[in-house]
Amino acid sequence: MSRTSVLTPPEGALPARTRFAAGVGAAVSGLSRALGRGGGSVVGGRAILAVDGRALSRLAAGRSIALVSGTNGKTTTTALLRAALETRAPVVSNALGANLPPGLASALAGGPPRAPAVLEVDEAWLGRVLEATAPRAVALLNLSRDQLDRYNEVRRLAGSWRAALDGRPGVTVVANADDPLVAWGAALCPQVVWIGAGQPWTDDAAGCPSCGGRIRFGGAGRAWGCASCGLQRPALDVTLDGAEVRGPGGWRVSLRLALPGRANRANAAVAIAVASVLGVEPATAAAAMSAVSEVAGRYATVAAAGRRARLLLAKNPAGWLEALDVLRPPPAPVVVAINARVADGRDPSWLWDVPFERLRGRVVVATGERSRDLAVRLRYAGVDHRRLPDPVDAIAAVDGDVVDVVANYTSFQALRARLAR
């Protein structure tokens, strides 16, 4: 969806109140854009829900909907799944990443009333969105620490998923069996497709979500299990082996993604599995996904301070572990930008859980509003670094024509907006 069409009121058999709400949202969204206050999807969605509190469920009625949730990879998986489903028909999606109910209402208000939808959903809101939208499919990617000053501990989130999916009719869940928290959270849903998508970050799943015992990793393949209660990785329906995805009935496809890294292969495998549930052939889905080269600015290479800067987003320790794997090899320099605003989580102590020691052997420039915190962490990691609070100055300071810039959420968005001007 283009930014200019985010809140165009749909035509069709919607209640008059919902149509009026969509019109109000469109006006508020347009005013927000005209004043340079952003894309308008969130504020417009808030206006929609203020006028019609049931707008989300009414706008979702009659659609084939897929939801995507998890701590990391939601936006990318949503984009890949959308590409796969658009091989059959236009798809409505919250492409700008607004994944709370106002953003979802905005996205649905911006498309034809019966068009299928792919929506990324914040993990803490999944239960409520399930109730409102009655999706056909739900993708559950992973659960790890993320903004714990704002959200619940991850086992509580897994518990909320479990309660929301318990006995849920009419929905097929595609769940990452390699994450014990996801496996436990999805286990009570009557219809689950278990996928071995991998989960390198296991620190947040060391305690069994069922009994509190110790989860042990490292059995055959990526098996895991609890010695106390017997919770273990479910038998897989779909497997990811390198760049090959294999599924029920013997189908197999090779991934040829423009997006880099293991995490994006895992995202694509999940998207292929969901697309298959919704009737798209795996080979067709994989071919469509190969054309996705960036997602909301992630992995884009842009001009900045006389350099070509490749922009990478990493929001939490699990995301950083994946981002470090796709950096250009040493001694290529890296710019790391850290803020700690509301959208990031105010507490930056998670920096101490990131294995920044892997940046030894290259020059790192620490930047952003919390560059001092980052510089302290880099010093203890034994990483040669400089500190320049301004991100563009930091990019200009590195040697060479190309630099990887890894940023957390608000620093990433602020840098993108600044470079676009």
Image (spheres, rainbow, N blue to C red):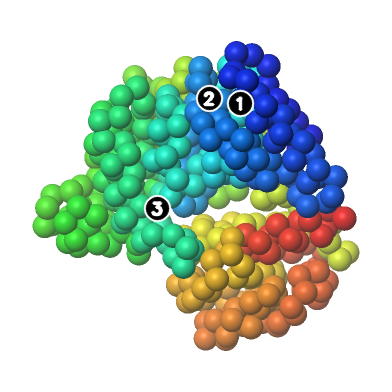
Residue 143's label in the rendered image is 3
**What x and y, as percent, mark residue 101?**
54, 41
Asked if the residues shown at circle 3 and circle 2 are in contact, with their CB atoms under 8 angstroms apart, the answer is no
Q: What residue type is labelled 1?
A: Thr
- Tag 1 residue: 18
Q: Is 309 located above or below residue 286 in the figure?
A: below
Q: Which of 270 and 163 is in front in this view?
A: 163
Q: What residue type is labelled 3?
A: Leu
Q: Is 84 located above or below residue 342 in the figure?
A: above
Q: In this view, does 283 lie to the left or right of 176?
A: right
Q: Is residue 349 visible?
A: yes
Quadrant position of the N terminus in the picture: top right
- Badge nearest the viewer, 1 or 2: 1
Q: Is residue 406 visible?
A: no
Give the quadrant of residue 95.
top right
Instruction: Identify the secondary structure beneath mark 2.
Output: helix
**What x and y, as percent, mark residue 212?**
19, 61
Mark with earlier residue (3, 2)? 2
Residue 58's label in the rendered image is 2
Residue 317's label in the rendered image is none
Q: Which amino acid does label 2 sit on?
A: Arg
Instruction: Identify the secondary structure beneath mark 1.
Output: helix
Mark with earlier residue (1, 3)? 1
Name which residue lies at 61% across and 26% down. Answer: 18
Q: Which of 224 and 228 is in front in this view?
A: 228
Mark with earlier residue (1, 2)? 1
Give the quadrant of residue 49.
top right
Q: In this view, does 96 lie to the left or right of 231?
A: right
Tell me the crowding category of disc 1: few under 14, some 14 to 19, or many 20 or more residues within 10 angstroms, Cα based.
many
Asked if the residues shown at circle 1 and circle 2 are in contact, with their CB atoms under 8 angstroms apart, the answer is yes
